[in-house]
Image (cartoon, coloured by chain):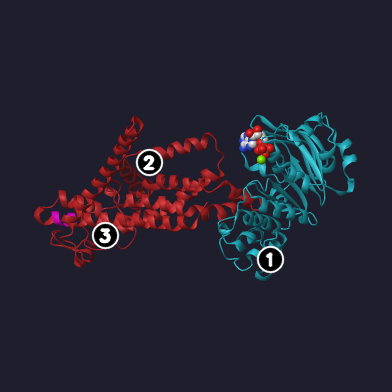
Chain colours: A red, B cyan
Amino acid sequence: MDIRKTKEFIGFGVLKSAAVIVLLALFAILYFVAARGIKVINWEFLTQMPRSGMTAGGILPAILGTFYLTICAICFALPLGVAAAIYLTEYAKQGRLVRIIRIGINNLAGVPSVVFGLFGLAVFVKFCGFGISILSGGLTLGILILPTIIRASEEALMVVPRSFREASLALGATKWQTISKVVLPNAVSGMLTGSILGIGRAAGETAPILFTAVTFYSARLPRSVFSEVQALPYHIYALMTEGTHPEAQIPIAYGAALVLVSLVLGIDLIAIIIRNRFRRRKKW
Amino acid sequence: MVKLVHSPYPSGHRQSIVHNETNIRISIRDLNIWYASARAVKDVSLDIEKNKVTAIIGPSGCGKSTLIRAVNRMNDIIPGVKVKGEILLDGKNIYDEDIDVVTIRKMVGMVFQRSNPFPKSIFENVAYGLKINGFPGKKKLAERIEQSLKDAALWDEVKDRLGDSALDLSGGQQQRLCIARALAVEPEVVLFDEPCSALDPVATARIEELIQELKEKYTIVIVTHNMQQAARISDFCTFLMLGELIEFDKTDKIFTTPSKKVTEDYITGRFG
Ligand SMILES: Nc1ncnc2c1ncn2[C@@H]1O[C@H](COP(=O)(O)OP(=O)(O)O)[C@@H](O)[C@H]1O
Ligand SMILES: [Mg+2]
């Protein structure tokens, strides 16, 4: 083997081990959570209210709470993010203002999530008067994932070939017709994939909902967007740090963790399915 | 009125020799086009006759695309492009303030260098231009699509699979589909920017033949860097170099007795 081949061999080896390590870490986490969580998971665990001061019963309110918060975040952030992306890539003159907005969006993505929690508390809970509620928490999560959605949507818009736009405009289409009938249909899969991955991330966040939406225990299921809720991430945190019966609480926490991880992976899986389905169809 | 910039080839003079005045469809007058600060088209004046094929030839980068795209204002979509001069379409300057670009583009269709069908069905591709213009009625739509595909010499090959994806067609078929799509909105002028440069010789011959037929109904401008192609299919020929119009004449004249040495050098393949 000559020296170049050896170098290549070592180079590939390093890259490959990095990939393997990442994969191992992922499986280790999954195994760790699944092995402990699986013991408590059954139909009752998923569909019942908690009982005996959270030391028994199910986690239905937390599952529902996370579900509602996520839906609320999507309803807020998806239209707003997509609209912003369309404006930034298709309409705005690519000058200083747009550059500043992009820098702003990128920085927003780097803000620690607990800061979003504080912001949500100040603005939605207090200033807007939504109180500790699904609405406040959902909006806070929405803002958290807004940069992800905007960036994913911008990327999806930018990979639509210029030749499609030219073809449409040359046929006498207006700019809006071109965007709505040619650009968007070809960008929608990319937008969805990126956005859903972001949403999966948001579903597992604790800090943004800590001061804005969650409660440790509620006797009833939420009845409107103004209800406070239980949520899986916070439920796990609370079970591990509060209460007086750790021996009963810890297994429930692992069960909840397993549900949460499955939920996030399920959401990611949906994103992958959407992407593959569209990718098979398009050939450009 | 834009100030007349000095041009070594006064348009009035050339026009009288080359054209039958009454048949002029498009008049390009002292056209200058800049990309940011680089001038890509310099003081070009030329007239394009109705129901004729006018070819634009010249070495790569000489401004052929820039010039032809000016005729349906496709340069508008490139940021930083500046246009000075006039392009009169049936006597009206298409760069006037009160002109609606969309109307111009409906009247002046365009076929691009690389075929660019939408990732939709064959039917939907041709229907697109009609639908955005609010074309009424399913039956009429189907008729018009059939007619356009026939005009583009594609109908026989696709009539049984109009619902198939346009991307499943061969390169030559895709380009003819793009022609059909452009014809469907009933333009008066059709611009072709090197429509055959990505095609094999057989597909190229089909398109050339088609362009000959199309000039019965349409006014045609075609950019090509293929000299033989220009000689075969065009009635008039424009030779551009470095953004300047070097020579404009009947194609026969250009290819037999060009009046400029550079033209002769170029068409005999001494450079380019
Ligand atoms: N979008 C653009 N931005 C800046 N310069 C351009 C752009 N398109 C073309 N040019 C320049 O303008 C000149 C003419 O280009 P073009 O019209 O495409 O030439 P041709 O079609 O004859 O090959 C070239 O020098 C090219 O580099
Ligand atoms: Mg070109």
Q: Amino acid at mark 2?
A: Ala
Q: Chain of mark 3?
A: A
Dot 2 alpha-carbon crowd within 10 angstroms: few under 14, some 14 to 19, many 20 or more: some
Q: Nearer the viewer, residue B149 or A120?
A: B149
Q: Amino acid at mark 3?
A: Ile
Residue bearing mark 2? A109
Residue bearing mark 3? A63
Boundaries of the magenta span: A250-254
**Is A40 covered by the magenta stretch?**
no
Say which element carries label 2: helix
Spot occupied by residue B179 in the image (x, y as percentages of width and height): 68, 55
Which quarter of the rendered image does ligand 1 occupy?
Answer: top right
Q: Nearer the viewer, residue B246 or B226?
A: B226
Spot occupied by residue B12 in the image (x, y as percentages of width and height): 88, 37
Q: Amino acid at mark 1?
A: Glu
| Residue A171 visible in the picture | no
Spot occupied by residue A206 in the image (x, y as percentages of width and height): 27, 48
